[in-house]
Image (spheres, rainbow, N blue to C red):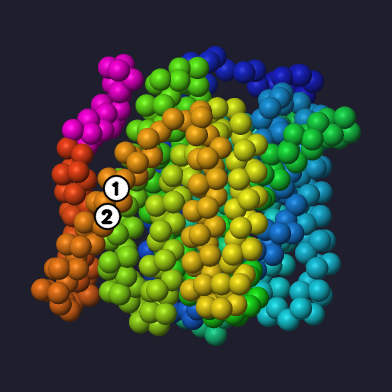
Amino acid sequence: MPTPHSPHPHPNPPPALLATRAVRGSLWVVASSYWTIGFGFLANMLLMRLLSPDVYGEFALAMFFFSLFQVRSKIALNYAFAQQRAITGETLGTLFVLDVLAGWGGVLLAFSAAPLLHWLGYPAAVIEIMLVLMILSGIESLLGVFQIVLESDLHFKPISIINGIAMPLSYIPAFVCAFTDLKRYSILAQSTSFTLLSLLGIGLYALYTQRHLLRLRWRYQPTLAVAYLRFGITSGLGQAIASLTTQVDNMILGTIAGTVHLGYYDRAYRVAQWPALLLSAVLGRAAIFTYSQLRDDMIRLQRAATRVLWGSLHLAMPVALAVMLSADELVPLLFGAQWEPAIPLLRVLILLAVIRPVWDNLSAWFIGSGEPQRVVVLSAIQLLLLVLIGTPLTLMAGGFGMAIGTVIAAGFSLLIAYWQVRRQLVVDLRQVLGPPLLAALGTLLVFWLLDRLVGSVQPLWLAVGWKAGVAFGGFFCWAYVLQPALFRSQVGEVWRAIRGRGERDS
């Protein structure tokens, strides 16, 4: 057991053990993410039948202001701490002081901004939700040091298990509120319960397994604090810009059109993101490590990038087609008839399910190639485009205009990104993008013909089933017909990669 005077209570583990821990930790993170997304989908499917759109709109607007005023996420202390890995009284004490100051500094900032938001005419519920979320972030900072230590040692399993247990339990208060007069605070109740349950689990785990950290003499070290802030702010601002890029549309639409329209838009956006989230969790993580390892072998790097891009498009496009074609029946089937105004928004926003995996592939390329600053610049460009394009379109067409603006901004930023790497990443876009687009058009043609023959189908689940079947079956059949040799080759590469022989055979 290390003593309080040990300069390095936890020496770095051997590389083999570290690699094993990293792989297992990643698997736990992926499993936890899938469980969270899956359970959240089912729970929200029920909640959306009980709650009105303005409830979701108020929470989405509050989340924007919470992200705007929160300080902790903008200084990324976890990344700064992971750079030096020495666990001493000085590093822990400095980390604790900075995290707590950032957490409660955000609380002070939010309370200072609340009167201004009220004067600007934002609903009281939006301001209340923002303040509660900020206070929770302040409470979370009191135990943040223990979670950061676990993550820096690649111990993701405890956190994943704690969050996996907290997730289903947190929906109990949400449903209690949904069945009472407290419907407006149902989503906030879930978020509050999840945070408090997770903190309770982390606190108990820390007392049980991390007591040696409490035996150290924690001290604040100004020089170390400056080093943490210098590195953390650089990383954190990039994350903050990326976060604002995904939420500024909520602020624009909520301010111009109100929380009801924002509620429809927010739910359509979330549904459109589900397939992309599942796909990105696998491809994005694998791509970063692959590009990092192959950065000095341009031939294999080009082949890997092309393979990931091909896989992203051929997995995302049929999902997008299935949602787009079955939206008329899918939305009322899953969420109820009250959400039918979200259908046209979903049909537009589902295009993000195709754009996002391609964007994630490009981000992985930049990070794996040692140029993460490009991701920050491109996120800032997308944020600017979204404001410039989305605002006038929202004034003209409300939520539908914002949906179009969001897709246009994402598409333009993607084109700019590939223009920047065209000399490094030599990919024949006509060969990679052309066949999937033609396959999608062919699938739409087949659907149009079948829809004229079949007509309206009841019940709803049967209509969703046959339309989704046409989307998947039609797309893959067309993809094979257009490029039979390449299709067999790429599927074979994926199969060999799954069996762990992809690079060994090449």
Q: Is residue 497 magenta?
A: yes
Question: Which stretch did the figure color magenta?
Answer: 485-506
Residue kind at label 1, given as amino acid type: Pro
Question: Residue 460 is drawn in which quadrant?
Answer: bottom left
480 vs 347: above or below: above
**In front of the other: 282 or 151:** 282
Residue under the image location 71 percent in, 33 percent down: 80
For this orientation, the residue located farthest to the bottom is: 181
Query: Which disc, if any, is residue 237?
Result: none
**In front of the other: 358 or 97:** 358
Q: Main secondary structure of the magenta part?
A: helix
Query: Which disc, if any, is residue 436?
Result: 1
Q: Is residue 396 magenta?
A: no
Query: Can the viewer see residue 313?
Result: yes
For this orientation, the residue located farthest to the right is: 222
Residue under the image location 15 percent in, 68 percent down: 449
Query: Can the viewer see residue 22?
Result: no
Left or right: 430 as drawn, with respect to 258: left
Across and down, in percent, residue 488 comes to 19, 34
Q: Quadrant of the N terminus?
A: top right
Kindly check if marks 1 and 2 are in contact, taking CB atoms under 8 A apart as contact.
Answer: yes
**In front of the other: 477 or 491:** 477
71 vs 128: above or below: above
User: Disc 2 on helix, strand or loop?
Assistant: helix
Residue kind at label 2, given as amino acid type: Ala
**Disc 2 crowd, CA 10 A, few/some/many (<14, 14-19, 20+):** many
Across and down, in percent, residue 269 comes to 47, 64
Across and down, in percent, residue 506 comes to 30, 17
Question: Residue 275 is drawn in which quadrant?
Answer: bottom left
User: Disc 1 on helix, strand or loop?
Assistant: helix
Query: Which disc, if any, is residue 440?
Result: 2
